[in-house]
Image (cartoon, grey):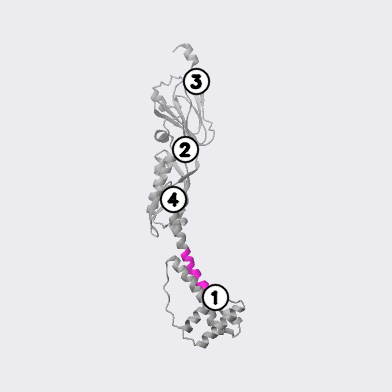
Amino acid sequence: MSLMSFVKKQFIDILQWNEEGDGVLSWRYPMEDFEIQYGGQLVVRESQMAVFVNEGKIADVFGPGTHKLITQTLPVLTYLQNWDKLFESPFKSDVYFMSTRLQLGRRWGTQQPITVRDKDFGMVRMRAFGIYSYRIKDPGVFFKEVAGTRESYGVEDLEQQLRNQVVASMSAAFGESNVPFLDMAANQGLLGETIKTRLVSAFERFGLTLDGFVVENVSLPEEIQQALDKRISVGMMKDVIPEYTRLQSAEAITLAAQNEGGLAGLGAGLGVGLGAGQTVAGAMAAALAQPAAAAPVAAPAALSDDEIAAKIEKLGGLLAKGLITQAEFDQGKAELLKKLIG
């Protein structure tokens, strides 16, 4: 090497990485034609680690702190270079800085529904979404398995691979949990812990440690969700219809008590109230295709012609006073005339 070439050669006294912004996991120090000055300093900040690579092989890994680069602090690199302790000269080696900060708020989700067996709905397709966080644990493994010799390796470069690992583990966790979908919301915390346990070894394979994993939402396809909504509505109406019928009966008693003859018109009032309640109940049952078995009812005693005429007259009085509607009057009258005609 000529004297001029030696003079032009540039030496690095301090190696350090001032992280700018988020999202970078690995960054290679720009060496170009530079050489590292023997006795120079390596500055590794908190939440960083530095990896020295010589001729494609990892030589040393340094944690946070300021390290003076001499033979005593580079034992492996010294061995690879066959340096003598008295041979103190600049050297060339690639240096990769790794960010060991927590990568927070990473989102995961199922791009396609996962088919699982559910004891309530049979085979169903579920979707799930949530967040997770991780950090680099072993820089050497991360360098060899993931980042390699790239100048820079970011969070987004790794994202798809990690999401695939999450979905694969989640599918197995769903299949083995035996938790019905209807109980899934109350068990999302437990489900998240189960999936996290499965993912630990998968992340360690890349030199990472999984810090947190949360299942935020588990949902069914729209058509199954609609069927579930209908099922909930059926359950609600089973409770509502009896209450409606009892309300109609109570109103009929009140109307009869307010009219001439006291409770004499109770039969007609109850007939109208129960008829309306039965009409609503029948319509709901037909719509839901779930007819309820009717309880046996004793046949009512036959009314005489005069009693039927009196009840129709009573209904007319209730209509005139505005206590029943025209539709209720017409329905009650039709039922009474049917009994009269036979």
* Residue at (52% x, 79% y) in the render: 333
First along the sequence among labels 2 and 1: 2
Q: Please tell me whether mark 4 sits on a helix, a strand or a loop.
A: strand
Compared with 9, 267 (above or below) is: below
Q: Which residue is label 3 attached to?
A: 11
Of residues 57 and 65, the one nearer the viewer is: 57
Quarter placement of the N terminus: top left
For marks 2 and 4, the one nearer the N-term is 4
Q: Quadrant of the C terminus?
A: bottom left
Badge 1 marks a residue whose secondary structure is helix
Decide whether residue 117 is among the magenta residues. no
Q: What's the residue type where badge 3 is placed?
A: Phe
Pointer 4 or 1: first along the chain: 4
**Inter-mark Cα distance, 4 to 3:** 56 Å
Q: Is residue 38 above or below residue 235?
A: above
Secondary-structure class at tag 2: helix
Image location of residue 254, percent across then percent down: 58, 79
Closer to the chain start, of discs 4 and 3, is 3
Q: How far is disc 3 from disc 2 in space, using C-alphas?
A: 34 Å
Q: Is residue 281 above or below residue 153?
A: below
Label 2, label 4: how many angstroms apart (C-alpha)?
A: 23 Å
- Magenta span of residues: 233-246
Quarter of the image for residue 119 reads: bottom left
